[in-house]
Image: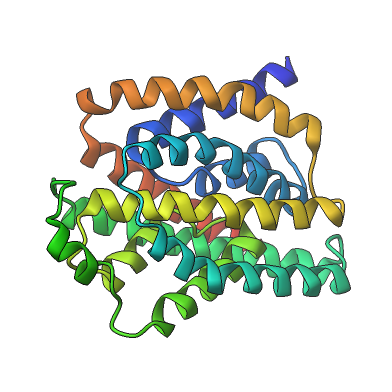
């Protein structure tokens, strides 16, 4: 019965991700900690690989549709992947089960959830339909940041945040890209964010696995539920009031963030 509950949790998170595009980490990690009582370091490590595998399929389909701007993905990864490796080295030295490390993880996770809640609500207020197509003569300018170092630095911040908390590669990443590339259509921003999340969560997740912070049987159960959930959510996306779901999600994430900080 308990095993079915993990599959069902994966299905629910996959459904919400398919409906809204909100990152699975901001939902799955609090569920594992608060509902199932999973230790924070195991919840974070397992969720990182959960995110990598669930977003891999989305990246493949977006790549085939030619709406992923790989230069942006590369610039973000140039900052996020080294930052993730450095953070993993620090976590290994401190020890993932160390009480101080656990406190750092839960506090960072709580702050990341509050930021994600704010970013999700911001998209409720400011989000609007934007065409995917952009003329080729404008594409080069739209994918050019004011300075090359900006996406690298923001990538480093996201990489550190994701590695410690498993949260930040979704809604926060989209808001960062909206600031860095204001002329880029929103679908292309979301596509770049999803594509960047795959190598980042894979590197961070495998790093957590190397220090014993991944529950492999649990990961398989979550994926067994999430993959059909994402498919169903993507099918229902056009029939569901997006703003209502995002508003409810932002409130839920804010509540989970406050609760984690107060642990």
Instruction: Classify the position of the C terminus by image quarter.
Output: bottom right
What colour scheme does the image use? rainbow
Left-right relation of 119 to 8:
left
Mark yes or no: residue 261 visible: no
Instruction: Classify the position of the N terminus by image quarter.
Output: top right
Q: Residue furthest top?
A: 1
Q: Position of residue 145 (x, y in %)?
A: 30, 77
Q: Quadrant of residue 84?
A: bottom right
Q: Indicate whether 173 appears above or below 250.
A: below
Mark yes or no: residue 236 visible: yes
Q: Position of residue 160 (x, y in %)?
A: 61, 70
Q: Quadrant of residue 93?
A: bottom right
Please name whichever residue, 212 or 132, is drawn nearer the observer in this view of the structure. 132
Which residue is depicted at the point 18% across and 55% down?
A: 125
Left-right relation of 243 to 171:
left
Which residue is depicted at the point 71% across and 34% down?
A: 219
Which residue is depicted at the point 85% across and 73% down?
A: 94
| Count of labels in the image | 0
Q: Indicate whether 8 appears above or below 213.
A: above
Q: Position of residue 122 (x, y in %)?
A: 26, 59
Left-right relation of 18 to 136:
right
Left-right relation of 200 to 41:
left
Q: Residue furthest front?
A: 137
Which residue is depicted at the point 28% across and 46% down?
A: 247
């Amino acid at each position: 019965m308990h095993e079915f509950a993990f599959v069902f949790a994966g299905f629910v998170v996959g459904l919400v991700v398919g409906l809204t595009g909100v990152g699975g980490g901001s939902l799955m990690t609090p569920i594992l900690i608060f509902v199932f009582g999973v230790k924070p370091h195991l919840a974070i490590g397992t969720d990182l690989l959960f995110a990598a595998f669930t977003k891999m399929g989305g990246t493949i389909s977006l790549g085939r549709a030619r709406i992923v701007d790989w230069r942006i993905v590369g610039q973000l990864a140039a900052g996020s992947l080294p930052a993730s490796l450095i953070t993993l080295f620090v976590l290994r030295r401190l020890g993932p089960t160390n009480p101080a490390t656990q406190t750092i993880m839960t506090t960072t996770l709580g702050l990341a959830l509050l930021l994600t809640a704010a970013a999700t609500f911001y998209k409720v207020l400011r989000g609007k339909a934007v065409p995917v197509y952009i003329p080729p003569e404008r594409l080069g300018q739209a994918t050019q940041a004011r300075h090359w170092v900006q996406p690298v630095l923001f990538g480093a911040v996201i990489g550190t945040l994701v590695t410690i908390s498993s949260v930040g590669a979704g809604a926060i990443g989209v808001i960062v890209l909206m600031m860095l590339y204001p002329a880029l259509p929103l679908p292309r921003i979301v596509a770049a964010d999803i594509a960047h999340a795959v190598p980042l969560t894979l590197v961070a997740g495998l790093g957590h696995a190397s220090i014993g912070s991944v529950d492999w049987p649990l990961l398989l159960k979550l994926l067994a539920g999430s993959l059909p959930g994402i498919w169903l959510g993507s099918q229902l996306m056009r029939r569901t009031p997006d703003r209502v779901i995002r508003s409810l999600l932002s409130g839920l994430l804010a509540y989970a963030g406050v609760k984690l900080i107060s642990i």
